[in-house]
Image (cartoon, grey):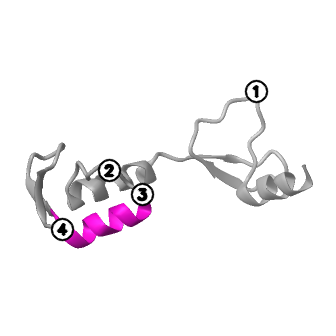
Amino acid sequence: MYEDKTLTCRDCNCEFVFTAGEQEFYASKGFVNEPQRCRNCRYIRKNENKARETHVTDCANCGKEARVPFKPNEERPVYCSSCFAEMRETN
């Protein structure tokens, strides 16, 4: 039913094969669009967000080191992950 297709990556313009097995998998998940990026470019794009800069500050509750993905300001308290989780459970 499915046949391998050769597609062109929108990022690097290299050709890649969208295999029959991949097409079947996409169909089983209900995806209607073909992939627009090759495997390497998808991997790079997926991991771009993981390389975010983190900022170190002191937890407003316990005073331990807290690493956050945003620049803290004096207007709002910042909590370490354990204090933040504890506060979420109580609210």
Left or right, residue 48 beside residue 54: left
Q: Amino acid at mark 1?
A: Glu
Q: Amino acid at mark 4?
A: Thr
Measured Cα–Cα span from mark 4 to mark 1: 53 Å
Q: Nearer the viewer, residue 64 or 26?
A: 26
Q: Which residue is mark 1?
A: 75
Please name the residue shown 45% across and 47% down the image: 52
Q: Are marks 1 and 2 in contact (CB under 8 Å)?
A: no
Q: Is residue 25 visible?
A: yes
**Residue 54 image offset from top left, x and y in percent:** 53, 47
Residue 2 lies in what quarter of the image? Answer: bottom left
Q: Which residue is mark 4?
A: 19
Please name the residue shown 91% across and 54% down the image: 90
Q: Nearer the viewer, residue 35 or 89?
A: 35
Is residue 20 one of those drawn in magenta? yes
Measured Cα–Cα span from mark 4 to mark 2: 21 Å
- Residue mark closest to the camera, 4 vs 1: 4
Which label was assigned to residue 45? 2
**Residue 55 image offset from top left, x and y in percent:** 57, 44
Q: Which residue is mark 3?
A: 30
Question: Which of the two discs, 1 and 3, labels the residue nearer the N terminus?
Answer: 3
Disc 1 crowd, CA 10 A, few/some/many (<14, 14-19, 20+): few
Vertical arrangement, residue 23 with respect to residue 35, above or below: below
Q: Are marks 4 and 2 in contact (CB under 8 Å)?
A: no
Disc 2 crowd, CA 10 A, few/some/many (<14, 14-19, 20+): few
